[in-house]
Amino acid sequence: MAGASSPSLVTHGLTRRFGRFVAVDHLDLTVEGTKVVGFLGPNGAGKTTALKMLTDLIFPTAGEAFLNGVSVQRDRKRALAGVGTLIETPEIYPSLTPREALEMAGRLRGLEADYVRERTRVVLEEVKMSEWIDRKTGRFSKGMKQRIHIAAALLSDPNILLLDEPSTGLDPRGMAEVREIVRGLKRSGRLVFMSSHILSEVVDVCDEVALIDRGKLLFYDTLANVSARLAGGATEVTAVFLKPLSDDELLSHLTGVPDLVSWSRAGPDRVTLRIQGGTEAQSRILETLVARRTGLWSFRESRSALEEVYLREITQGEQ
Amino acid sequence: MSGSAVADARPVAGAAPPTTRTTPPSWKQAIILARFQLRDYLRAFRFSLMMGIVGAIGVIITILLVHFRPAVLHSASAFYGSFWTGGVVFVMVVAVIIYGGDAIAGEFQNRTGYFLLGLPVRRAAVYAGKFLASFAACVVAVLFYLAILVADASYFLGGGAVSDPGQLVASLGLALLYLLAVLGTAFLFSSLFKQSLFGVLVVLFMFLIGWNILTSVVTSLFQTEPWFVISYAAPVIGYPLTGTPQHLVRFGALVSYSPTLGEGIAIMLGYFVVTSLLGLLLFEREEFT
Ligand SMILES: Nc1ncnc2c1ncn2[C@@H]1O[C@H](COP(=O)(O)OP(=O)(O)OP(=O)(O)O)[C@@H](O)[C@H]1O
Ligand SMILES: [Mg+2]
């Protein structure tokens, strides 16, 4: 099933300037196959700009983008045929209902009426909007609209999904549902390329991450490799104790603990530990603290590996 | 290279729809889009607004007719020649202001274009679809106005209300041609802006006073036939009913031109074609930033 027919997203030197400002700078990406890729970067990094060039909403100053092998710039209609998109915050003609909006999208894509009807039911169920199917979208809240647009992106069962912060504006349950939808897409052989600021979401659903800052791609790698990058660096763990500890107590608990680089108080009952040596070191420290009967009841990384790498790469960029 | 695997780029899993790869031809997409756009148009407030204005014009005309019983009430041709020709141009301009001025600009301001352009459609199909929908909405206004006049005529002229349907149909045809030209021009103005208000204001200004100013400036200052002004062609709509007037009339130093039928048709077609091409060209280059 893979091979020639597997989904692909490729950019060659994709560049966009706004006046003198370079929003996206020679972006070279090749993403192929069934996977979920997180597109990360600080505000203004150029994620939306890149996604808009990938969907021909705006035009590159230089370079080209290909979806399923078709140049977006040369033939948007064919390039987007197998692609579901949700870029920034689109709107539907306000007096149309979700049923009608999806029917319009489906018919424009050339899907048959019966298929559209059935899929509309399925995708609205998936985004939990079934009971609103015949209400005008104009009055919908931001999150409700977002759900409808996610449904619209899924409607044609595309093999590539380009999503710009799909879970912004959604309530916590909505976010969890989006994660579930994205996982489901991967299971059914889709390529999902999504920007996000929610690193826990990225860790949760993505196989690979592309990090962009000031228009430049810093790295594109698997999540596993990203964690491995950290092996050299220190991890931060927050340890929480049952009762507040005095400085003396804390000192006696923590002196002589192996692999502990440094520590600092994070509150009356908690302390931030900087640990060298990855998960094994963390395990040794945890065991030591438990053995010392410190009243420790919570011990967890204050940041994920992805967060560590993200912060490190982004701050390096600022120097 | 990645450019070759194109034809095969299909969804992989078994659940893939049967027709993903057969995106309809653009003309068909334009019609699909127009259908849904029109549905939105007819449900929204602006439709009531347009019909309300046309209805009000109808009421005023009816009151005047009842009150003054003018001489034109004695023949259908004369009746339509005065009330249809003058009124329909105004009705069309009102409809175009409502359905044309913000048609393209609104896709940016209301962000609906971000939804449409996320689909596998060419910009041209979106432009054409929007045009078709606006045209259809304006035609509703024109037909409503015509219906009011026919009702009035039936009341005052009885069986002779539509004594020569051919004349009226020819005049209606010319009116719709004029509508194409006016709407095409409005779409061009609309594609110049990303804010609905500007589109509407420019269309409003041009069609209510702009062209008239241009016409009088050109005729009085340069003594030239204003063949390049769209509204110059408007009176042609009445020719099937009232006959073609003299091309050039002089009152001392004053000159007044009337287009020939052929000239009028050429002006309308020219405006439609040129403004549509220009507007499309602009829209093709516009970005959804
Ligand atoms: N139309 C425009 N004109 C000028 N500058 C623009 C335009 N659109 C984007 N930019 C600039 O390009 C840069 C990248 O913007 P972009 O929206 O792509 O960022 P982003 O990564 O999506 O950020 P966020 O995470 O906040 O959504 C920003 O500095 C922005 O100011
Ligand atoms: Mg963004």
Image: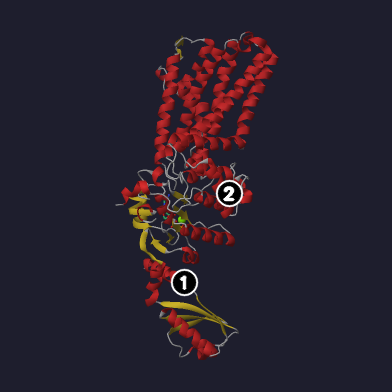
Q: Kindly identify the amino acid type of the residue bearing the numbered disc 1.
A: Ser
The label shown at residue A121 is 2
Q: Of callouts 2 and 1, which one flags the residue occurring earlier in the amino acid sequence?
A: 2
Q: In the depicted view, which residue is nearer to us: B105 or A234?
A: A234
Mark 2 neighbour density, 10 Å: few (under 14) some (14–19) many (20 or more): some
Dots 2 and 1: beta carbons under 8 Å?
no
Q: Which image quadrant is residue B94 in?
A: top right
Of all chains, the one bearing label 1 is A
Q: Position of residue A281 (x, y in %)?
A: 43, 82
Helix, strand or loop at label 1? It is loop
Residue A318 can be seen in this image? yes
Helix, strand or loop at label 2? It is helix
Residue under circle 1? A304
Mark 1 neighbour density, 10 Å: few (under 14) some (14–19) many (20 or more): some
Q: Kindly identify the amino acid type of the residue bearing the numbered disc 2.
A: Arg
Q: CA distance from mark 2 to mark 1?
A: 38 Å
Could you tell me which residue is drawn at 39 percent across and 68 percent down?
A313
Q: In the depicted view, which residue is nearer to us: A18 or A274?
A: A274
Q: Position of residue A13 (x, y in %)?
A: 32, 54
Q: Position of residue B211 (x, y in %)?
A: 48, 25
> Is label 2 or label 1 in front?
2
A296 shown above or below A101: below
Could you tell me which residue is drawn at 54 percent across and 33 percent down?
B99
Q: Which image quadrant is residue B141 in?
A: top right
